[in-house]
Amino acid sequence: MAAHRFYAPQASRIGQTVALPPGEAHQLRHVLRLRRDATVHAFDGRGREFVARVQAVDRDGVSIRTVEAVEPAREPAVDLALALAVLKGRTTAAVVRDATMLGARTIQPITTARSPAGAAAAGLDRAVDRWQAIAIASAKQCRRAVVPAVRPPLPFAELVARGPCGLGIMLVEPAIAAPHASIRTVADQPPPARATIAVGPEGGWTDAEVEAAAGAGFRLLTLGSRTLRAAAAPAAALAILQYVWGDL
């Protein structure tokens, strides 16, 4: 049976005793009911992972001691950022979970002209904390040692003003009037070092947003002749890109 994994952001070397964050400590103590000397794995969220032993379980929390370095799961060669339009309800959380499993390195929530009512960038701070916690939980489950950084939300105009980081891709619907191509065309070029993929909201991008993105250097690409749900498109696109770039 695989050892239980815990997120320990302070773990950086062998022979170090660190305290687990409160949520991780709660899971170890109250959910899994582990005790002193139990063997676990700990990862720091930045690519390091260790075999560790539980040192203390008490009212003050849980501490572990790293005893051996572990080779973590290989990270994708392409540093991939997902610029995701905020979706309705808990749908954004599900996309964050799946994007973590599929190797995204950064998740940048964005607000667009067709974002849900009330989804202003300035009012999403608490949601970002929740999405970051979901990214941590997803990394634990899929055995990544890297936790994607969930950035503070940006208005779409600011994302465009900054321009894409590396190769820029905007997923668009196949029926748009602007010139576009299939996502399969990325296979015709060498893998980039970095890439940004922007995925729109339930109502899709406006013509003005598509024009602005294209002007900023984003390539307009589709996932084929069918229009996918906004919640399904990110996972489909990430899986395709990871396959094309040799990371699946």
Image: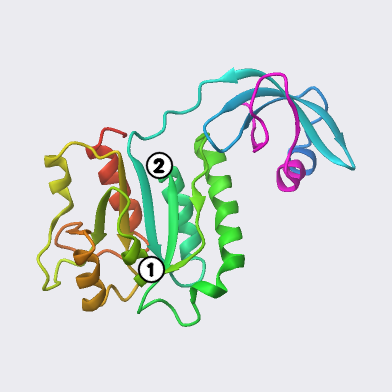
Q: Amino acid at mark 1?
A: Glu
How many numbered discs sit on the rendered protein?
A: 2
Residue 193: percent from the left, percent from the top? Answer: 30, 38
Q: 68 or 218, which lies in front?
A: 218
Q: Which mark is residue 213?
A: none
Residue 126: percent from the left, percent from the top? Answer: 62, 66
User: Image point 25% across, 61% down: which residue?
Assistant: 171
Residue wearing tag 2: 103
Please state if 110 lies on the left or on the right of 177 as rendered. right
Give the magenta part as a residue range: 2-27
Q: Is residue 230 visible?
A: no
| Quarter assignment of residue 217 | bottom left
Q: Is residue 243 visible?
A: yes
SS for callout 2:
loop
Near mark 2 (Cα within 10 A), the count class, few <14, some 14-19 or many ≥20, is many
Residue wearing tag 1: 158
SS for callout 1:
helix
Asked whether 10 falls inside the magenta stretch, the response is yes
Q: Amino acid at mark 2?
A: Gly
- Indicate whether 116 appears above or below 195: below
